[in-house]
Image (tube, helix red, strand yellow):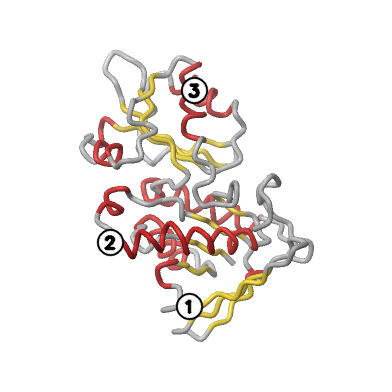
């Protein structure tokens, strides 16, 4: 059982949900926080010994999902398009920064299964230093870094939308492997770049986006924990499908990929 947790405006999460459901007959649910109380309700039990438990009731299909049945979860809640955020009203922003950020980290922390994009420091956006760390790491190995890499105002997204696709190179890091979109040609010095990325032994799923430069090496523009999944098409869906089905999951003892340094919510 796969659980995808994402915002209602996350087209990549909806693409993954539709693709896995139609092509792989994968049992899964898409949970959108904006629909809480409208399409579903969540029962969350928190105990001071850390043995949390959650269940979800979906109104339309009358299904009660015990979260102990979830064998793999993909958390994309850290993805909020800054351009969409600019146009959100005060009520939406208050929900996203207060109630939403207080409840869903506790819910995600209660899951006893392997998890993509874990909770750090008890918050959805608690791992806000990973981009700068990657920038420093790759810069030390001679790769250029764009000044917009750590931007949070929306300028990075605006820049991405103006760059021709032919000038963009992206790849995904997953389970100590590098995944390229189908038909994309590797950039100059790609073997060295791949080796530098693999040296860090990163526990999370990441996407790296570079700008191709004429007569120069690539320039790092973005590192994100919420990749543009549809760019990788069946290459990614087959990998994630295989990973889900090969994942050992023992819900009785809370076999989990939660960050051990994160205090119980």
41 w.r.t. 138: above or below: below
| Foreground of the two, 158 or 92 | 92
Label 1 CA crowd tier, 10 Å (few <14, some 14–19, many 20+) = some
Mark nearer the N terminus (3 vs 2): 2
Q: Is residue 186 left or right of residue 177?
A: left
Identified at 66% across, 51% down, the residue is: 258
Q: How many marks?
A: 3
Q: Which mark is on residue 136?
A: 3
| Foreground of the two, 209 or 151 | 151
Q: Is residue 249 left or right of residue 15?
A: right
Mark nearer the N terminus (2 vs 1): 1
Q: Residue 86: x percent and y percent? A: 26, 51
Label 2 CA crowd tier, 10 Å (few <14, some 14–19, many 20+) = few
Residue highlighted by disc 1: 40
Identified at 41% across, 59% down, the residue is: 96
Residue highlighted by disc 2: 89
Quarter assignment of residue 70: bottom right
Judged from the image, the secondary structure of the residue bearing numbered disc 1 is strand
User: Split into 4 quadrants, where in the image is the N terminus?
Assistant: bottom right
Judged from the image, the secondary structure of the residue bearing numbered disc 3 is helix
User: Split into 4 quadrants, where in the image is the C terminus?
Assistant: bottom right
3D distance between C-alphas at marks 3 and 1: 42 Å
Mark nearer the N terminus (3 vs 1): 1
Quarter assignment of residue 242: bottom right
66 w.r.t. 250: above or below: below
3D distance between C-alphas at marks 3 and 2: 36 Å
Q: Residue 50: x percent and y percent? A: 74, 61
Identified at 51% across, 38% down, the residue is: 173
CB of mark 3 within 8 Å of CB of mark 1? no
Q: Is residue 214 left or right of residue 194?
A: left
């Amino acid at each position: 059982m796969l659980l995808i947790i994402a915002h209602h405006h996350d087209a990549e999460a909806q693409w993954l949900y539709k693709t896995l459901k139609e092509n792989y007959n994968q049992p899964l649910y898409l949970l959108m926080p904006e629909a809480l109380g409208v399409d579903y309700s969540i029962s969350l039990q928190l105990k001071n010994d850390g043995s949390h438990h959650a269940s979800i009731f979906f109104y339309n299909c009358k299904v009660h999902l015990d979260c102990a049945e979830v064998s793999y979860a993909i958390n994309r809640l850290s993805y909020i398009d800054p351009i969409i955020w600019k146009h959100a009203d005060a009520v939406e922003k208050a929900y996203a920064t207060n109630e939403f950020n207080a409840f869903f980290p506790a819910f995600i922390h209660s899951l006893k299964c392997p998890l993509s994009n874990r909770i750090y420091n008890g918050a959805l956006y608690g791992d806000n230093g990973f981009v700068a760390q990657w920038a420093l790491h790759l810069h030390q190995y001679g790769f250029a870094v764009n000044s917009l890499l750590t931007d949070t105002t929306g300028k990075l997204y605006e820049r991405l939308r103006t760059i021709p696709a032919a000038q963009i190179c992206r790849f995904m890091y997953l389970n100590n492997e590098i995944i390229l979109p189908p038909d994309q040609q590797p950039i100059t010095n790609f073997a060295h770049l791949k080796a530098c990325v693999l040296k860090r032994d990163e526990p999370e799923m990441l996407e790296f986006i570079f700008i191709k430069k004429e007569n120069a090496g690539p320039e790092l523009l973005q590192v994100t924990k919420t990749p543009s999944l549809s760019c990788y098409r069946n290459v990614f869906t087959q990998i994630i499908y295989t990973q889900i089905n090969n994942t050992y999951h023992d819900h009785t003892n809370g076999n989990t990929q939660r960050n051990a340094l994160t205090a119980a919510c």
